[in-house]
Image: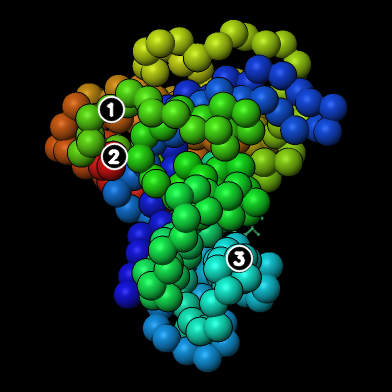
Protein backbone atom coordinates (compact mmCIF):
# COMPACT_ATOMS: atom_id res chain seq x y z
CA UNK A 1 0.00 0.00 0.00
CA UNK A 2 1.25 3.45 -0.89
CA UNK A 3 0.35 7.08 -0.33
CA UNK A 4 1.76 10.33 -1.66
CA UNK A 5 2.64 12.97 0.93
CA UNK A 6 1.58 15.86 -1.28
CA UNK A 7 3.75 18.98 -1.17
CA UNK A 8 1.86 21.88 0.38
CA UNK A 9 1.97 25.44 -0.91
CA UNK A 10 0.55 28.59 0.66
CA UNK A 11 -1.15 30.60 -2.10
CA UNK A 12 -1.23 33.45 0.44
CA UNK A 13 -0.24 33.71 4.09
CA UNK A 14 -1.19 36.69 6.24
CA UNK A 15 0.14 36.95 9.78
CA UNK A 16 -2.47 38.68 11.91
CA UNK A 17 -0.96 38.68 15.39
CA UNK A 18 1.38 37.18 17.93
CA UNK A 19 -0.08 35.27 20.88
CA UNK A 20 1.26 35.41 24.42
CA UNK A 21 2.51 31.83 24.06
CA UNK A 22 4.69 32.85 21.10
CA UNK A 23 2.42 31.29 18.46
CA UNK A 24 1.08 33.41 15.62
CA UNK A 25 -2.42 33.82 14.32
CA UNK A 26 -2.41 33.38 10.58
CA UNK A 27 -4.80 33.36 7.64
CA UNK A 28 -3.68 31.26 4.75
CA UNK A 29 -4.91 29.50 1.63
CA UNK A 30 -3.38 26.06 1.33
CA UNK A 31 -3.09 24.28 -1.98
CA UNK A 32 -1.32 21.04 -2.86
CA UNK A 33 0.86 19.62 -5.60
CA UNK A 34 0.08 16.25 -7.16
CA UNK A 35 3.59 15.12 -6.12
CA UNK A 36 5.61 14.86 -2.95
CA UNK A 37 7.20 12.26 -0.71
CA UNK A 38 6.08 8.64 -1.08
CA UNK A 39 5.14 6.42 1.84
CA UNK A 40 4.79 2.62 1.55
CA UNK A 41 3.65 0.14 4.15
CA UNK A 42 3.52 -3.61 4.69
CA UNK A 43 2.02 -5.52 7.63
CA UNK A 44 4.53 -6.28 10.39
CA UNK A 45 4.85 -6.84 14.10
CA UNK A 46 5.77 -3.61 15.85
CA UNK A 47 6.41 -0.30 14.12
CA UNK A 48 9.47 0.39 12.01
CA UNK A 49 10.51 2.99 9.47
CA UNK A 50 13.08 2.87 6.71
CA UNK A 51 14.19 5.98 4.87
CA UNK A 52 15.23 6.28 1.24
CA UNK A 53 15.43 8.98 -1.41
CA UNK A 54 17.45 12.16 -1.90
CA UNK A 55 16.62 13.74 1.49
CA UNK A 56 16.60 10.57 3.62
CA UNK A 57 19.69 11.79 5.46
CA UNK A 58 18.06 15.09 6.44
CA UNK A 59 15.23 13.75 8.62
CA UNK A 60 15.33 11.92 11.96
CA UNK A 61 15.50 8.17 11.40
CA UNK A 62 14.08 7.19 14.80
CA UNK A 63 11.09 7.88 17.00
CA UNK A 64 11.13 11.63 16.30
CA UNK A 65 10.25 11.12 12.67
CA UNK A 66 6.76 12.52 12.12
CA UNK A 67 5.72 9.32 10.34
CA UNK A 68 6.40 7.27 13.47
CA UNK A 69 4.88 9.91 15.74
CA UNK A 70 1.71 9.78 13.63
CA UNK A 71 1.71 5.96 13.65
CA UNK A 72 2.12 5.79 17.44
CA UNK A 73 -0.64 8.36 18.02
CA UNK A 74 -3.07 6.51 15.73
CA UNK A 75 -2.26 3.16 17.33
CA UNK A 76 -2.77 4.54 20.82
CA UNK A 77 -5.99 6.40 20.15
CA UNK A 78 -7.60 3.61 18.10
CA UNK A 79 -6.32 0.79 20.32
CA UNK A 80 -4.50 -0.97 17.47
CA UNK A 81 -2.33 -4.03 18.22
CA UNK A 82 -1.02 -4.65 14.70
CA UNK A 83 2.25 -3.14 13.55
CA UNK A 84 3.54 -1.72 10.27
CA UNK A 85 6.78 -1.67 8.29
CA UNK A 86 6.89 1.78 6.72
CA UNK A 87 9.24 3.09 4.04
CA UNK A 88 9.47 6.82 3.43
CA UNK A 89 10.91 7.94 0.10
CA UNK A 90 11.98 11.45 1.12
CA UNK A 91 11.93 13.58 -2.03
CA UNK A 92 10.95 17.00 -0.64
CA UNK A 93 13.70 19.16 0.85
CA UNK A 94 13.47 19.49 4.64
CA UNK A 95 12.67 22.79 6.40
CA UNK A 96 11.63 24.34 3.12
CA UNK A 97 8.11 25.74 3.61
CA UNK A 98 6.29 23.01 1.70
CA UNK A 99 5.26 21.07 4.75
CA UNK A 100 7.24 17.91 4.09
CA UNK A 101 7.07 16.60 7.63
CA UNK A 102 3.41 17.56 7.99
CA UNK A 103 2.54 15.89 4.69
CA UNK A 104 4.42 12.75 5.78
CA UNK A 105 2.50 12.63 9.07
CA UNK A 106 -0.82 13.09 7.28
CA UNK A 107 0.05 10.44 4.67
CA UNK A 108 0.94 8.04 7.51
CA UNK A 109 -2.48 8.60 9.11
CA UNK A 110 -4.29 7.95 5.80
CA UNK A 111 -2.16 4.92 4.95
CA UNK A 112 -2.30 3.24 8.36
CA UNK A 113 -6.04 3.84 8.71
CA UNK A 114 -6.34 1.79 5.49
CA UNK A 115 -3.84 -0.91 6.51
CA UNK A 116 -5.43 -1.37 9.92
CA UNK A 117 -8.97 -1.05 8.48
CA UNK A 118 -9.84 1.65 10.98
CA UNK A 119 -13.08 3.54 10.78
CA UNK A 120 -12.39 6.32 13.26
CA UNK A 121 -15.24 8.58 14.27
CA UNK A 122 -15.66 11.75 12.23
CA UNK A 123 -13.06 14.24 13.34
CA UNK A 124 -10.87 11.71 15.21
CA UNK A 125 -8.15 11.70 12.54
CA UNK A 126 -8.29 15.51 12.45
CA UNK A 127 -7.77 15.65 16.22
CA UNK A 128 -4.70 13.43 15.95
CA UNK A 129 -3.46 15.54 13.03
CA UNK A 130 -3.81 18.76 15.05
CA UNK A 131 -1.70 17.30 17.86
CA UNK A 132 1.07 16.50 15.40
CA UNK A 133 1.42 20.01 13.98
CA UNK A 134 -0.47 23.07 12.76
CA UNK A 135 -0.19 22.12 9.06
CA UNK A 136 -1.06 18.43 9.49
CA UNK A 137 -4.88 18.93 9.43
CA UNK A 138 -4.65 20.70 6.05
CA UNK A 139 -2.36 17.94 4.76
CA UNK A 140 -4.81 15.25 5.84
CA UNK A 141 -7.25 16.17 3.05
CA UNK A 142 -4.61 17.80 0.85
CA UNK A 143 -7.20 19.87 -0.96
CA UNK A 144 -7.37 23.65 -1.32
CA UNK A 145 -8.54 25.14 1.98
CA UNK A 146 -8.45 28.29 4.03
CA UNK A 147 -6.62 27.93 7.34
CA UNK A 148 -7.06 30.27 10.30
CA UNK A 149 -5.91 30.11 13.91
CA UNK A 150 -2.47 28.54 13.64
CA UNK A 151 -3.51 27.33 10.19
CA UNK A 152 -5.30 24.39 11.76
CA UNK A 153 -8.89 25.70 11.63
CA UNK A 154 -10.00 24.80 8.13
CA UNK A 155 -12.74 26.01 5.80
CA UNK A 156 -13.39 25.49 2.08
CA UNK A 157 -11.66 28.00 -0.19
CA UNK A 158 -11.27 28.85 -3.85
CA UNK A 159 -7.94 28.28 -5.53
CA UNK A 160 -6.52 27.53 -8.94
CA UNK A 161 -8.38 24.84 -10.87
CA UNK A 162 -7.02 21.34 -10.21
CA UNK A 163 -4.34 20.43 -12.74
CA UNK A 164 -2.89 23.94 -12.98
CA UNK A 165 0.81 23.63 -13.96
CA UNK A 166 3.04 24.37 -10.97
CA UNK A 167 6.79 24.76 -10.54
CA UNK A 168 8.46 24.70 -7.11
CA UNK A 169 12.01 25.99 -6.69
CA UNK A 170 14.25 25.99 -3.62
CA UNK A 171 17.70 27.59 -3.50
CA UNK A 172 19.11 24.74 -1.43
CA UNK A 173 19.05 26.50 1.94
CA UNK A 174 17.15 25.01 4.87
CA UNK A 175 15.08 27.64 6.70
CA UNK A 176 13.69 26.69 10.11
CA UNK A 177 10.16 27.99 10.65
CA UNK A 178 11.14 28.89 14.22
CA UNK A 179 13.77 31.29 12.89
CA UNK A 180 11.36 33.15 10.62
CA UNK A 181 8.27 33.88 12.74
CA UNK A 182 10.12 35.87 15.44
CA UNK A 183 11.40 38.19 12.69
CA UNK A 184 7.86 39.16 11.67
CA UNK A 185 7.68 42.90 12.38
CA UNK A 186 4.42 42.65 14.35
CA UNK A 187 2.27 44.86 12.08
CA UNK A 188 -1.05 43.35 11.05
CA UNK A 189 -1.31 43.98 7.29
CA UNK A 190 -4.99 43.00 7.17
CA UNK A 191 -7.05 39.93 6.38
CA UNK A 192 -6.86 37.69 3.34
CA UNK A 193 -8.66 39.32 0.44
CA UNK A 194 -11.64 37.53 -1.08
CA UNK A 195 -9.54 36.64 -4.11
CA UNK A 196 -6.55 34.43 -3.23
CA UNK A 197 -4.57 35.93 -6.12
CA UNK A 198 -4.39 39.25 -4.27
CA UNK A 199 -2.93 37.81 -1.07
CA UNK A 200 0.63 38.28 0.20
CA UNK A 201 3.05 36.12 2.11
CA UNK A 202 3.85 38.15 5.23
CA UNK A 203 6.71 35.77 6.05
CA UNK A 204 8.60 36.70 2.91
CA UNK A 205 10.47 39.68 4.38
CA UNK A 206 11.41 37.80 7.59
CA UNK A 207 12.52 34.79 5.54
CA UNK A 208 14.65 37.02 3.29
CA UNK A 209 16.49 38.19 6.39
CA UNK A 210 17.41 34.55 7.09
CA UNK A 211 17.99 33.42 3.49
CA UNK A 212 18.64 36.31 1.05
CA UNK A 213 18.85 33.73 -1.80
CA UNK A 214 15.03 33.69 -1.84
CA UNK A 215 15.02 36.99 -3.74
CA UNK A 216 16.87 35.45 -6.68
CA UNK A 217 14.41 32.53 -6.77
CA UNK A 218 11.40 34.88 -6.85
CA UNK A 219 13.06 36.97 -9.59
CA UNK A 220 13.90 33.90 -11.65
CA UNK A 221 10.33 32.59 -11.45
CA UNK A 222 8.79 36.00 -12.19
CA UNK A 223 10.93 36.30 -15.34
CA UNK A 224 9.52 33.11 -16.89
CA UNK A 225 7.05 33.21 -19.77
CA UNK A 226 3.54 32.31 -18.64
CA UNK A 227 4.37 32.52 -14.92
CA UNK A 228 1.34 33.59 -12.91
CA UNK A 229 1.14 34.01 -9.16
CA UNK A 230 4.77 33.83 -8.03
CA UNK A 231 5.06 33.51 -4.25
CA UNK A 232 7.20 32.12 -1.47
CA UNK A 233 5.53 29.18 0.33
CA UNK A 234 5.15 29.00 4.11
CA UNK A 235 8.22 30.28 5.91
CA UNK A 236 10.42 29.61 2.87
CA UNK A 237 12.73 29.11 1.23
CA UNK A 238 10.74 27.28 -1.47
CA UNK A 239 9.00 29.56 -3.97
CA UNK A 240 6.52 28.59 -6.66
CA UNK A 241 4.78 29.81 -9.76
CA UNK A 242 1.54 28.75 -11.38
CA UNK A 243 1.72 28.58 -15.16
CA UNK A 244 -0.65 29.07 -18.06
CA UNK A 245 0.52 25.85 -19.72
CA UNK A 246 2.65 22.80 -19.05
CA UNK A 247 4.90 23.82 -21.96
CA UNK A 248 5.65 27.17 -20.27
CA UNK A 249 6.27 25.42 -16.93
CA UNK A 250 8.63 22.90 -18.53
CA UNK A 251 10.56 25.64 -20.35
CA UNK A 252 10.88 27.52 -17.05
CA UNK A 253 12.14 24.40 -15.26
CA UNK A 254 14.79 23.79 -17.92
CA UNK A 255 15.87 27.44 -18.00
CA UNK A 256 16.10 27.80 -14.22
CA UNK A 257 17.91 24.45 -13.99
CA UNK A 258 20.50 25.59 -16.53
CA UNK A 259 21.07 28.94 -14.80
CA UNK A 260 21.09 27.51 -11.26
CA UNK A 261 22.16 23.87 -11.27
CA UNK A 262 22.29 23.81 -7.46
CA UNK A 263 18.63 24.71 -7.00
CA UNK A 264 15.99 22.05 -6.30
CA UNK A 265 12.99 22.00 -8.63
CA UNK A 266 9.72 20.10 -8.78
CA UNK A 267 7.46 20.25 -11.83
CA UNK A 268 3.94 19.32 -10.85
CA UNK A 269 0.32 20.35 -11.08
CA UNK A 270 -2.15 21.48 -8.42
CA UNK A 271 -4.49 18.87 -6.98
P1 LIG B 1 6.20 23.93 7.02
O1 LIG B 1 5.94 24.36 5.63
O2 LIG B 1 5.03 23.17 7.62
O3 LIG B 1 6.74 25.00 7.90
P2 LIG B 1 8.79 22.83 6.45
O4 LIG B 1 8.79 22.33 5.05
O5 LIG B 1 9.38 24.19 6.66
O6 LIG B 1 7.32 22.78 7.00
P3 LIG B 1 9.63 20.22 7.36
O7 LIG B 1 10.32 19.76 6.13
O8 LIG B 1 8.30 19.66 7.65
O9 LIG B 1 9.54 21.81 7.39
O10 LIG B 1 10.64 19.96 8.59
C1 LIG B 1 10.44 20.49 9.84
C2 LIG B 1 11.23 19.70 10.89
O11 LIG B 1 10.55 18.46 11.16
C3 LIG B 1 12.64 19.33 10.48
O12 LIG B 1 13.51 19.99 11.35
C4 LIG B 1 12.75 17.83 10.63
O13 LIG B 1 13.90 17.43 11.35
C5 LIG B 1 11.50 17.40 11.37
N1 LIG B 1 10.93 16.14 10.82
C6 LIG B 1 10.51 15.08 11.48
N2 LIG B 1 10.04 14.12 10.66
C7 LIG B 1 10.13 14.60 9.45
C8 LIG B 1 9.79 14.08 8.18
N3 LIG B 1 9.24 12.88 8.01
N4 LIG B 1 10.05 14.86 7.11
C9 LIG B 1 10.57 16.10 7.28
N5 LIG B 1 10.91 16.62 8.44
C10 LIG B 1 10.70 15.89 9.53
Labels 2 and 3: the sequence-earlier one: 3
Q: Which of 92 and 265 is in front in this view?
A: 92
Tell me the distance, in whole angstroms, between the alpha carbons under discs 1 and 3. 36 Å
Residues tagged 1 and 2 counted as in contact (Cβ below 8 A): yes
Residue 101 spot, x, y in % from top left: 55, 56
Q: In this view, does 99 lie above or below 189?
A: below
Judge whether residue 184 can be spotted in this image. Answer: yes
Q: Name the quarter where the C terminus is drawn.
A: top left
Q: Which mark is residue 77?
A: 3
Tell me the distance, in whole angstroms, between the alpha carbons under discs 1 and 2. 7 Å
Per the image, the residue denoted by label 2 is 270
Q: Is residue 40 above or below residue 260?
A: below
Q: Which of marks 1 and 3 is in front?
A: 3
Q: Which mark is residue 237?
A: none
Report the residue at 33% width, 23% height from top.
158
Report the residue at 62% width, 9% height from top.
189
Labels 1 and 3: the sequence-earlier one: 3
User: Which corner quadrant of the figure contains ligand 1?
Assistant: bottom right
Amino acid sequence: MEETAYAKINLALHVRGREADGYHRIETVFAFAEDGDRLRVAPAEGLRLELEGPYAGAVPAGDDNLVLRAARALRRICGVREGAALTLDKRLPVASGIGGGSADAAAALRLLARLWRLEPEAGALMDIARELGADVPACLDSTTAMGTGRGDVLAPADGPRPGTPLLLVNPGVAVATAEVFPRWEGMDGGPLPGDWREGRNDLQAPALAVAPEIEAVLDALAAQRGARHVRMSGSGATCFALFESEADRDLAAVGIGADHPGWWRLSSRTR
